[in-house]
Image (spheres, helix red, strand yellow):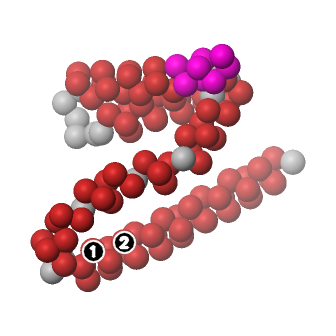
Amino acid sequence: MKYIGQLTIILGATFLGELLYALLPLPVPAGIYGLLLLVLALAFRLIRLEQVEETGDFLVQIMPVTFIPAAAGLIPAWPLLREFLLPIVTVILVTTLLTFGVTGKVTEYILNREEKKK
């Protein structure tokens, strides 16, 4: 029963994100609105982490499985994608390295900031 409650909170934030997407004329995906709402609710302590942590961990663990249908959907488009393979791989490599770098720097900053508080 606990997991149903946690999933309800997460899906509620997702639904509110869908509503914002429909109401606001901004080019922001609905999922981003939902994540932002959930992060804000956690930051302002409207929701405690314990209220969504276990279900959130589970959803993160199964996330790779959710990409299988999208990847399988690309198989019929292979003749079109083949000519763009080098640019696609280049973009994937560059953005992955940038993501690693930015994530590392943000983590360093947060850890240093916490050390200074002690």
Residue 30 is at least partly visible in this image: yes
The residue positioned 36% from the left and 72% from the top of the image is 92
Q: Which residues are magenta?
A: 1-8
Give the overall secondary structure of the magenta segment.
Answer: helix
In-image side of 26 versus 7 (left or right)? left
The residue positioned 27% from the left and 74% from the top of the image is 88
SS type, badge 1 = helix
Residue ID for mark 1: 88
The quarter of the picture where the N terminus appears is top right
- For badge 2, the amino acid type reads Ile
Residue 27 location (% of width, % of height): 22, 40
On screen, residue 50 above or below 99: above
Residue ID for mark 2: 92
Residues at marks 1 and 2, CA–CA distance in whole angstroms: 6 Å
Query: How many labels sit on residues?
Result: 2
The residue positioned 30% from the left and 39% from the top of the image is 29
The residue positioned 18% from the left and 64% from the top of the image is 76
